Image: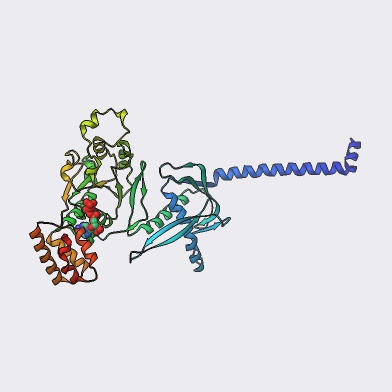
């Protein structure tokens, strides 16, 4: 024993080996300790939130991350508390999102918004540090909108998941600010709704001139419907209302629906029933998924069922045709919505008589309103919208138009009038002198 001890002490190689062994052992223990600590921390104190790209909050949070970097810089200058600070590591991975902004004069300008690209970043929100990771699946695309499948993961040291809810709320608030005063149009994309272009400036409700009180009555009807949710629920009546605006082309049906949506702070889901690939199932799905505060607009409803009769529909074996939208499918979709949210559907047509009686029966269409060619009232009002304070000239214009209309037994659409006013917008006298051109 004594001999072995002496041998070890006198042999430097042995000594170094033992030293290294102890060090290695220590390192292994340390590593294990660290990984255990990390596991405990992860289990107890690290929380993360995944936001898949198909979730509506994905673009909001992404935008919030980039926009608040700027806001932070400004706030920091004022020595205030910062909200969200983005420190990209490395700062060379960005993605672009281009916005087009319509100016007052009608021209369009663009702005490039730089978002955090694929990669990892550190961020701060209300003084808390976050690890942000944006990843993209190389081989997967979202079939609904054709974009690559992505995930945004936010990780932080905390036991309070409310912090994520706060971020989501703030991001949504910021996104809503961008939409304030604007109308969002959605179109169908597969079985989902997708925003169509950027939010548009709302059309002023008064800019669409309908005959006496039609616009006001329709507005009141929708407001009344929206106020009476509990009345419908108490009586077990489906909380929905259908409107059919019918009349000649260019009388303002679509413009009015857009102005009405703007007035009520609603958006519009535009559905083209004649679209290729529209089937009964797809339509039913879409009508069950309407984004909140949105009107559904079915334009030119008569065109969706050209020469398609119930007879052929029911006798043709299904296997011989690709699945299509059928009239009974449309009726079922209109009836079958089980939703606690209100649902407002607008339909438009130039040919009321072509519509199937079942489609426009009460419950499916509750209000039918003719939007016709212009009356005297509209002619005068539209004239004064284009040429303010020209009361006298509006009377002359009206009497001239009426004379020609009587002589040739014709009527005019508001769109025709608008075209005439735009053509001679710089000279009100030319508008009157050239009135007969309106009927060419
Ligand atoms: N009553 C109106 N008041 C103001 N502008 C109108 C009116 N009617 C039509 N217009 C103008 O005419 C154009 C076409 O109108 P709109 O598309 O709303 O007509 P529509 O009745 O929906 O036509 P269609 O039946 O062909 O779809 C728009 O630019 C709109 O500004």
Q: What number of labels is visible?
A: 0
109 left or right, relative to 38:
left
305 left or right, relative to 191:
left
Q: Position of residue 172 (x, y in %)?
A: 40, 54
79 left or right, relative to 298:
right
Q: Residue at x 85, y 41 (%)?
A: 14
Q: Position of residue 181 (x, y in %)?
A: 32, 60
Tell me if I can see residue 278 in this picture: yes
131 left or right, relative to 296:
right
Judge by depth and name the residue closer to the eye, 414 or 187: 414
Q: Quadrant of ligand 1?
A: bottom left
Q: Residue at x 72, y 44 (%)?
A: 27
Judge by depth and name the residue closer to the eye, 199 or 371: 371
Quadrant of the drawing holding the C terminus:
bottom left
Q: Residue at x 13, y 62 (%)?
A: 377
Q: Position of residue 67 (x, y in %)?
A: 46, 59
How was this image coloured?
Answer: rainbow
Image-quadrant location for residue 357 = top left
Quadrant of the drawing holding the N terminus:
top right
Tell me if I can see residue 212 in this picture: no
In this view, 87 is above or below 344: below
Q: Position of residue 129 (x, y in %)?
A: 54, 54
């Amino acid at each position: 024993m004594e001999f072995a001890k002496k041998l070890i002490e006198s042999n430097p190689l042995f000594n170094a080996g033992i030293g290294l062994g102890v060090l290695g052992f220590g390192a292994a223990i340390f590593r294990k300790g660290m990984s255990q600590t990390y596991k405990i921390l992860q289990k107890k104190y690290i929380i993360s939130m995944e936001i898949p790209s198909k979730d509506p909050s994905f673009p909001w949070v992404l935008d919030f991350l980039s926009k608040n970097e700027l806001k932070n810089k400004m706030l920091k200058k004022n020595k205030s508390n910062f909200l969200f600070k983005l420190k990209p590591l490395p700062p060379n991975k960005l993605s672009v999102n281009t916005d087009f902004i319509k100016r007052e004069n009608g021209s369009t300008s663009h702005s490039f918004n730089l978002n955090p690209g694929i990669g990892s970043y550190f961020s701060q929100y209300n003084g808390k540090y976050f690890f942000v990771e944006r990843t993209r699946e190389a081989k997967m695309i979202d079939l609904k909108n054709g974009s690559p499948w992505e995930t945004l993961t936010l990780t932080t040291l905390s036991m309070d998941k409310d912090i994520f809810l706060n971020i989501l709320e703030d991001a949504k608030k910021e996104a809503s600010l961008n939409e304030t005063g604007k109308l969002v149009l959605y179109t169908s994309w597969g079985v989902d709704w997708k925003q169509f272009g950027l939010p548009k400036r709302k059309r002023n409700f008064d800019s669409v001139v309908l005959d006496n009180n039609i616009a006001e009555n329709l507005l009141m009807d929708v407001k009344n419907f929206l106020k009476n949710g509990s009345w419908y629920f108490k009586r077990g009546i489906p909380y929905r209302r259908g409107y059919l605006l019918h009349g000649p082309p260019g009388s303002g049906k679509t413009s009015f629906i857009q102005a009405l949506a703007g007035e009520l702070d609603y958006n519009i889901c535009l559905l083209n029933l004649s679209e290729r690939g529209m089937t009964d199932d797809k339509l039913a799905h879409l009508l069950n998924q309407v984004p909140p505060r949105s009107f559904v607009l079915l334009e030119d409803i008569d065109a969706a069922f050209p020469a398609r009769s119930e007879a052929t529909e029911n006798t043709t074996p299904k296997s011989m045709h690709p699945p299509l939208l059928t009239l009974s499918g449309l009726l079922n979709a209109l009836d079958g919505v089980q939703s606690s949210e209100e649902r407002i559907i607008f339909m438009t047509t130039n040919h009321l008589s072509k519509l199937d009686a079942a489609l426009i029966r009460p419950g499916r269409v509750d209000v039918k309103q003719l939007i016709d060619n212009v009356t005297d009232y509209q002619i005068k009002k539209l004239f004064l919208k284009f040429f303010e304070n020209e009361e006298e000239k509006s009377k002359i214009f009206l009497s001239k138009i009426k004379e020609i209309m009587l002589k040739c037994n014709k009527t005019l659409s508001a769109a025709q009038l608008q075209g005439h006013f735009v053509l001679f917008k710089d000279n009100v006298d030319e508008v009157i002198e050239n009135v007969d051109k309106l009927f060419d």
